[in-house]
Image: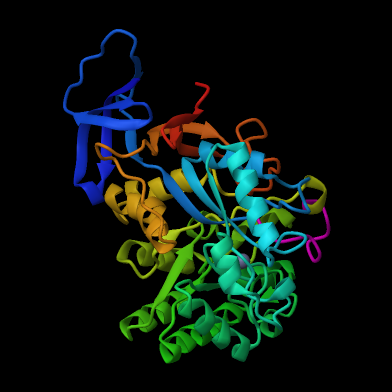
Amino acid sequence: MIIIKNGYLVDPENNLNGKFDILIENGVIKKIDKNIEPFAGVEVINAENLIITPSFVDLHVHFRDPGQTYKEDIYTGSLAAVAGGYTTVVCMPNTLPAIDDVTIVRYIIEKGEEVGLCRVLPSAAITKGRKGKELTEMALLKDAGAVYFTDDGAPVMDSFIMRKAMEYAGSIGSFVADHCEDLNLSNNGVAHEGEIAAALGLPPLPPEAEDTMVARDCILSIQTGMPVHICHISSKLSVEIVAWAKAMGAKVTAEVTPHHLYLTDEEFLDFSCIAKVSPPLRTHQDIEATRWALASGIIDYVATDHAPHSHNEKMMDLHICPPGMIGLQFALPIVLELVKKDYFDLNRLVEVMSTNPAKKIGIKPPALKEGEIAELTIFDPFESWEVNEETILSKSKNTPLLGKKLVGKVKYTFYNGKMVYKDKQ
Ligand SMILES: [Zn+2]
């Protein structure tokens, strides 16, 4: 049995916003009260000055298993997840082979359960081999446990295929999520088309590569009446298009990554591959737009797009190195900073990090409520820590934040009634 003393609890779904003690017995939240006295045999966690929320849910991670486990695997990915306060993650299907087959869907679920640190769920590809041509057997994949469909890493370029995919996924009670990028417009660009790319002579990637596909998907959603989800939205105009589509009654949802909320294309100033990500890091105006959209509900939740790559891959030439950066351990400090800067409050943090993504895939949102299995995150909102080889628990260390300090640190994570992470300090 565990008593968590004096933590500040935030869970808007359960009208909690204040200082309470929590008693956990056999993994279940037995009691939430102003003062629970410790008794013989009980373990006490002192949560004075710490915040306790439902644990986080990330619908967009790349754990690289099967096929590229030198970058990450389900064990190391799970370690990074729980250190970031996450207890549910959804793996992207751009593995080798792609998750387009029932056996691979089952493999991810079983491997995740074997590791047992958090809930590891698969998405599945929209098209076979993620080649954009032929739809997968979505109904079978959904029955096997795929929680949604995406060709992420690549867009579905063919609009007719995308329309069919939306209708098919929607008709079986699921949805498609699109990596919005018109590959003809992006034309092997590396950096956001703007002053920085021009000054450095980097191949420019125009924002309309994203914007036109976001617009297309929104229109298809309006016309078909079926849901579509926009992955890693990053440009100001894309945000405005989603706002328009929502006003039109479209079943459109959108996610934003921590890096698109925090970093700009200035990260390219040292010509490093570390700054290369898809979609590219953009400008201060784009960042402002995504922050306010996350506050207002135009953007529904945060997803990390945690994309590990090896050191060697990120040492390659900027034109050919693979895009992507890790993010599971940085989401909380970055979103917390937006709370401190008054973009939104802690209730909204819980919505965008936990409740909304859980509801999106139809799982029960973690809840601070008597009778519920303990799935919660305890963090210090003011602890400063350095991002380095030691503090990053992911197998890969590819992030522009390396060597920098972040404020806000996860101290404990509980999953399925058990403590699965405890900070060393
Ligand atoms: Zn993507």
Q: Can residue 149 be seen in this view?
A: yes
Q: What residue is drawn where x is 53% and y is 74%?
A: 176
Residue 83 lies, in percent from the top left, at 53, 36
The answer to which quarter of the image holds residue 7 is top left
Q: Which residue is drawn at 60% across and 59% down?
A: 266
Ligand 1 quarter of the rendering: bottom right
Q: Judge by depth and name the residue closer to the eye, 333 or 80.
A: 80
Q: Does the magenta stretch include residue 323?
A: yes
Could you tell me what secondary structure mostly forms the magenta stretch?
loop
On the image, the x and y values in percent for residue 195 come to 61, 71
Residue at position x 65%, y 30% from top?
Answer: 390
Q: Is residue 1 left or right of residue 386?
A: left
Specify the quadrant that holds the N terminus.
top left
Q: Which residue lies furthest to the left in this view?
A: 34
Q: In screen coordinates, is 124 left or right of 289?
A: right
Q: Is 376 on the left or on the right of 107, as rendered?
A: left
Q: In which quarter of the image is residue 134?
A: bottom right
* Residue 103 horizontal/vertical position (percent): 69, 59
Q: From this viewpoint, is residue 203 visible?
A: no
Residue 198 picture quarter: bottom right
Between 86 and 142, the residue placed more toward the observer is 142
Q: Tell me if residue 228 comes above or below residue 115 in the rendering.
A: below
Front-lying residue, 293 or 62: 62
Rendered location of residue 38, percent (x, y): 25, 13
Is 236 magenta? The answer is no
Reply above or below: 200 against 258: below
Left-right relation of 425 to 2: right
Q: What stretch is highlighted in magenta?
A: 314-325
